[in-house]
Image (tube, helix red, strand yellow):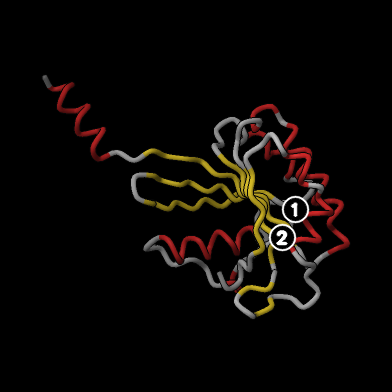
Amino acid sequence: MFSLFYGLWKYMFSKTEFHVLILGIDKAGKTTLLEKLKSQFSSIEGLPPDRIVPTVGLNIGRIEVSNSKLVFWDLGGQPGLRTIWEKYYEEAHAVVYVIDAACTSRFEDSKSALEKVLRHEDLQGAPLLILANKQRCFNWQDLPDAVSSEELARYLDLKKLDERVYMFEAVSGYDG
């Protein structure tokens, strides 16, 4: 009888937990984005952008939305830290890949890192959200030399992702 009540209680009050990786090369704005998400969707105040330092290792953010818990793992993007990314792939339910749209000289490095992530067998079924960060949002421009999301999407050749569930969005992690 106890197990019946426990099962009912667990069903009614537990939340499904999803693990979301936030990846991208260093200085793309991953941590800024995570801190803005925490500020907007939880009771925890995120760090202001001027207090954010480069991630060494990972940052974790938790957000509860309706009947779900989202656990974000923001992993450092420096070349030496990218080798640990795959240790998190097996438990990941989705991937958010952040690209600095204002730094064209690093597009090739970012594209290469994204392709390596997408080739990994543990992420084959994981949905993907690609964010072109530092874009114009709401008539405000984060950085004046940011390329358009359309131009960046063409460069990344997203048509190769036909079999994967993905979405590509222009954002400004700085202002949300």
Give the x, y percent position of residue 147: 80, 67
In three-dimensional space, the C-alpha distance between marks 2 and 1, rounded to whole angstroms, equals 6 Å
Give the amino acid type for the residue marked by disc 1 in the picture: Ile
At x 44%, y 51%, the residue is 62
Camera-nearest residue between 174 and 55:
174
Q: Which residue is mark 2?
A: 28
Q: Secondary structure at mark 2?
A: loop
Which label belongs to residue 25?
A: 1
Neighbor class of circle 2 (other Cα within 10 Å; few <14, some 14-19, many 20+) is: many
Residue 171 drawn at (x, y percent): 63, 65
Query: Residue 129: x and y, percent?
Result: 63, 49
142 relative to 69 in the view: left or right: right
- Residue drawn at point x = 55 percent, y = 69 percent: 176
**Amino acid beneath label 2:** Ala
The mark total stands at 2
For the residues bearing labels 2 and 1, Cβ distance under 8 angstroms: yes
